[in-house]
Amino acid sequence: MGLFNKLFGKSDKKENDTMSNVKLAVIYYSSTGTNYQLAQWAEEAATQAGAEVKLLKVEELAPEAAIESNPAWKAHVEATKDVPTVSLDDLEWADAIIFSVPTRFGNLPAQMKQFLDTTGGLWFNGKLANKVVSAMSSASNPHGGHEATILSLYTTMYHWGAIVAAPGYTAPETFAAGGNPYGTSVTVGQDGKMTEDVKQGVTHQAKRTVQVAEWVKKGLQQ
């Protein structure tokens, strides 16, 4: 039954095992800092909700020349050099995952897509089934692909057999944060600043993700 349990997310733990804290990985890609800030807010809210949290970045793939040509990009890379880079072990460790990414032509940035494309081994062995996932995004204009980017990421999650914990319209904070039911999203002006106040939306989404992960984890342990 071991392979069946791996593929379908069944737990081998005994029914009387005690409930442990949700393990949450907040995984982001950010070139100039917006999605890093969203990820930090998610980390803060999830920690307050009692989760054990890892804040992790995906590997930067852009050529050095491109980074050097943009002062804000260069400064962000330097400022976050000590943030751990995500590994496949982190995915296996996590009960839940929150992703934060900018849009690239209405799709995922190559840095995040490349990382997700390395997860085939975990998927094949059933290690990603029943992970609770949620996602956030940013773009430089109101119709720049916020929703499309999140939905594109969720497509990979469906193949994992993950459980998507979108914020939906489960709290007023969703409307205050721009009204995106798929995940908190924000527009970034030419000055590099967010044009909407989305911190409360991120906080609600992070706490909701932890709550859903608690329900799932408790169910798997029974």
Image (tube, rainbow, N blue to C red):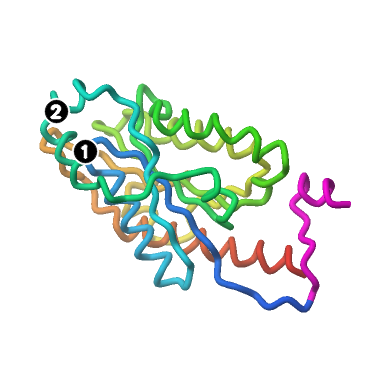
The picture places residue 123, in percent across and down from the top left corner, at 67, 38
Could you tell me residue 101's position as x and y percent? Answer: 37, 38
177 or 109: nearer the viewer: 109
- Write down the quadrant of residue 15 in the picture: bottom right
Badges 1 and 2: C-beta atoms under 8 Å apart?
Answer: yes
Is 58 placed left or right of 79 in the picture? right
Question: Is residue 121 positioned above or below 49 on the image?
Answer: above
Which residue is drawn at the image coordinates 43% and 32% (left, top)?
Answer: 149
**Nearest to the observer: residue 97 or residue 81:** 81
Q: Is residue 122 left or right of residue 143?
A: right
Mark 1 residue element: loop
Three-letter amino acid code at the position of disc 1: Thr
The residue shown at (54%, 43%) is: 88
First in residue order: circle 1 vs circle 2:
1
At horizontal 55% and vertical 52% (from top left) the residue drawn is 165
State which quarter of the image contains the C terminus: bottom right
Query: Would residue 185 be found to the left or right of residue 113 on screen?
Result: left
Q: Does 13 lie within the magenta span? A: yes
| Three-letter code for the amino acid on which mark 2 is drawn | Asn
Label disc, if present, on residue 70 of the rendered structure: 2
The foreground one among 82 and 40 is 82
For label 1, the residue is 32
Give the alpha-carbon distance from disc 1 to disc 2, as whole Å: 9 Å
Q: Residues within 10 Å of mark 2 (few under 14, many from 20)?
A: few
Which span is picked out in magenta?
A: 1-15
